[in-house]
Amino acid sequence: MSNQSELRSLLETVGVVIGSLVIAIVIIVVATKKYDSPKPVEEVVKTDGQENVTPVAIVKVEEGDSSEAPSSSISGDMIVKANCAMCHSTGLMNSPKIGDKAQWEPRIAQGKDLLVSNAINGIRTMPAKGGNASLTDAEMEAAVIFMANSSGGNF
């Protein structure tokens, strides 16, 4: 009797293994089956693509007094708190600390234009625009002026 139960157990095991392999093959075939697209590839390629290049929106710029200096949409203080303070409040990576007149004095002596240019383009370990590419040049200028004036400058 034990030979029959061992044979039955062996046949059941082989059946389970073969059944599992068949099910796995069916799942793989169904999952990787390539479905035909509704349009032939040639027809898709031949379209001029004009519908893909139409603008989503149109920006209308009002003409204003060009003698006015561009104003920052955010105050220098807010820009510094949101973007610059991480390094400039702690001196991270040898950045001059806000309020440390000794560190800022040689930088302020170079002039506002050079300081702003370095802030916009990056210098040494400081990335361009402090790592926030969405800031405008005017916003960077406002941040530099705020930090320099907070550290003994008068821009």
Image: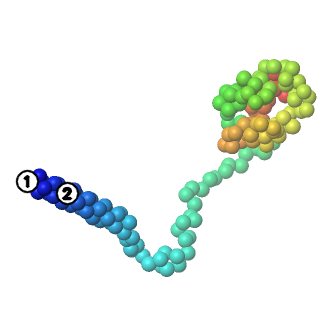
Q: Looking at the image, which is closer to me, 111 or 22?
A: 22
**Secondary structure beneath disc 1?**
loop
Please identify the quarter of the rendering in which residue 135 is found: top right
Q: How far across and how far down the image is residue 44, in percent?
A: 49, 75
Q: Specify whether residue 137 is in view.
A: no
106 is higher (above) or lower (below) than 3: above
Which amino acid type is marked by label 2?
A: Leu
Q: Label 1 to label 2, Cα distance in Å?
A: 14 Å
Which amino acid type is marked by label 1?
A: Met
**Secondary structure beneath disc 2?**
helix
Look at 76% across and 36% down and name the residue there.
126
Quarter in which the C terminus is drawn: top right
Q: Residues within 10 Å of mark 2 (few under 14, many from 20)?
A: few
Q: Residues within 10 Å of mark 1 (few under 14, many from 20)?
A: few
Q: Looking at the image, which is closer to me, 139 or 43?
A: 43
Look at 70% across and 39% down and name the residue there.
131
What label does residue 58 carry, if any?
none
1 left or right, relative to 16: left
Please identify the quarter of the rendering in which residue 143 is found: top right
Q: How far across and how far down the image is residue 148, in percent?
A: 81, 26
Q: How far across and how far down the image is residue 102, in percent?
A: 86, 20
Q: Say which of marks 1 and 2 sits in front.
A: 1
Q: Specify whether residue 35 is in view.
A: yes
What label does residue 10 carry, if any?
2
Q: Mark 1 or mark 2, which has the lower sequence index?
A: 1
30 is higher (above) or lower (below) than 2: below
Q: How far across and how far down the image is residue 112, in percent?
A: 86, 33
From the image, tell me which residue sits under label 1: 1
